[in-house]
Image (cartoon, helix red, strand yellow):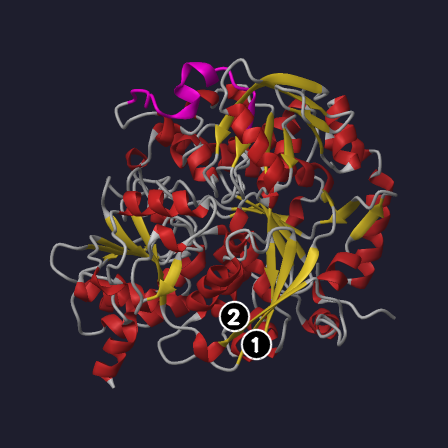
Amino acid sequence: MTARTLYDKIWDDHVVHQAEDGTCLLYIDRHLVHEVTSPQAFEGLRMTHRKVRAPEKTIAVPDHNVPTTLDRANAATMTEESRIQVEALDKNAKDFGINYYPVSDVRQGIVHIVGPEQGWTLPGMTVVCGDSHTATHGAFGSLAHGIGTSEVEHVLATQTLIQRKGKNMKVEITGSLRPGVTAKDITLSVIGATGTAGGTGYVIEYCGQAIRELSMEGRMTVCNMAIEGGARAGLIAPDEKTFAYCMGRPHAPKGAAWEAAVSYWKTLFSDEGAHWDKVVTLRGEDIAPVVTWGTSPEDVLPITGTVPNPADFTGGKVEAVQRSLDYMGLVPGQKLSDIKIDTVFIGSCTNGRIEDLRAAAAILKGKKKKDGLRAMVVPGSGLVRAQAEEEGLAQIFIDAGFEWRLAGCSMCLAMNPDQLAPGERCAATSNRNFEGRQGRGGRTHLLSPAMAAAAAITGHLTDVREMMAETV
Amino acid sequence: MDKFTTLTGIAAPMPLVNIDTDMIIPKQFLKTIKRSGLGKNLFDEMRYTQDGAEIPDFVLNQPAYRHAEIIVAGDNFGCGSSREHAPWALLDFGIRCVISTSFADIFFNNCFKNGILPIVLPQEQVDVLMADARKGANARQTVDLEAQTVTTSDGQVFPFTVDSHRKHCLLNGLDDIGLTLEKVSAIDTFEKKAGTLRPWA
């Protein structure tokens, strides 16, 4: 039998029909839905008198619009338009009989955190959502990617997607990470090496010792940003850590079904000799804590670096870098660690899980944020929030002067009231530093939760390794 | 979905690389529950000042390009989020074709679902089309999907490739869901088989 990659295997197991020109109908095991990209899809179903084919495989949760302040039960905290979108999801979930976690449910949170947490996401599955960060679920060895609203409607109606197979790309991180370096630094460093279009047309499999050594939370952070590297999907072969994470989750199989599932999951790896269309290798030891300086996730450098000069680039990137520096209010040659910040945002589907909060709290313990700086922690789900309170992390954040919020997407994309003002500069654990992403004129520097915590204490971008030396 | 057969129209030059979906349609306009009406907010933060006045330098505000139907763009157009509001906004403004060296996957896919044709051409050819677009409103470019060609205002012809299934759907304005539901028995069979092999899924 031909050697196959993990992606090949999952693909082969989900092809419903293949046309002569290679176009496939791919079966979808899990469809996650949120309030922003679904209303037009449900409307389409109503207009054509179609039903949701597999409501039991469809899971909805509002996350993008919802306020994260403690008074959010008060409807006045939401704009009229946001309220209408959330109410539309309430109604659509009820009318079409799909699984639903409303705002009032403690399990509510960011869709990409809720899916794995509740055991909906399992190895070997196909998972889609009308959201580009669906790549997150690839951490379980599932084929997971974002889709547009027309495709949301297509999956609702048919439980399939019309797809062409992508190419295989291997990203190997050899060796181990050094202290102070995290999954976020891996994923940003890969994008720095390949560019934001480096993965276009590919499905990435992340592998190597440094990936194996990551927790499931870390693996989700790595896969989450596959899309920022241009790849629709990124995945990691499941192993004992994956199985341990899934075991006992509400929607994971139990008993004999669990045993059968695990024996299937153990076949999910890339065979020796499988074909790769592209291979990228980074040494774990070479990866440093990084920050972004521009308005594209590929604009990333180690914290010890300096702001680059547009003249160092070629082609269309020269103009883009000049535009970025103007937008970001930075000058070439400026030390990254001299950049002063106004705001710190810890949260998002990239870094809103318990391990992220632990990493930030470890740096903040017994310390205070810089005076005058705005700092907030937005847990990725109600359950992450509850766990962080139980572990004492919430109190560390509160004592350090952070706002301790309820779960949602929040300032990652600023669709709810959590936004930057023009010119406001933010150290953010989220995934996009695009112009206007966190609010019109807002300036975003992407970094890890530990680096965000360090920046909150000093008031400027800071090498977290210096603080770790202090505490040892 | 409207058919796409041939199009002759004004092409707006947007040479910036990595034009992302937050630029195409900023998030504050994603709160709609409709597909229509987004054209006025296309490229909102590049197109208008904070108080809503037009920024005269922005290409689509220039008299020559206010009725553009084609955009010639820098590399990696449409990167970022999966929001279909991006093609909806382009379409509502009147854009039916975007030409670049590369597109982000999800955006590329979303275009075809809405009757917009994204065309990938090599850098040298995009450069020629960009220079042609800069000539203004009299320099109309022609896109012929059946023949798979783009023709500059002075008659240079560049062939392009397009997926045969997507071409068929665009030419005929076909709805994917209807086509897929013709294969419902294949889906039923797959579900039965998968239900035995992977009952937990």
Residue at 88 percent of width and 71 percent of height: A1
In which quadrant of the rendered image does the N terminus of chain B lie? Answer: top right
Q: Nearer the viewer, residue A375 or A103?
A: A375
Q: CA distance from mark 2 to mark 1?
A: 7 Å
Q: Position of residue B80 (x, y in %)?
A: 49, 45
Q: Position of residue A98 (x, y in %)?
A: 60, 43
- Chain hosting mark 1: A
Q: Which residue is mark 1?
A: A241
Residue at 74 percent of width and 34 percent of height: B166
Magenta-highlighted residues: B52-71
Is residue B65 shown in magenta? yes
Amino acid tagged 2: Met
Q: Position of residue B42 (x, y in %)?
A: 45, 26
Q: Which residue is mark 2?
A: A216
Q: Secondary structure at mark 2?
A: helix
Q: Main secondary structure of the magenta part?
A: loop
In this rendering, the answer to whether A193 lies above or below B135 is below
Is residue B112 shown in magenta? no
For disc 2, the neighbor class at 10 Å (few under 14, some 14 to 19, many from 20) is: many
In which quadrant of the rendered image does the C terminus of chain B lie? Answer: bottom right
Q: Secondary structure at mark 1?
A: helix
In this rendering, position of residue A104 left or right of residue A452: right
- Chain hosting mark 2: A
Discs 2 and 1 share one subunit: yes
Query: What label does residue A414 carry, if any?
Result: none
Q: Nearer the viewer, residue A110 or B102?
A: B102
Q: Nearer the viewer, residue B21 or A264?
A: B21
Q: Position of residue A117 (x, y in %)?
A: 51, 62
In this rendering, the answer to whether A208 lies above or below B199 is below
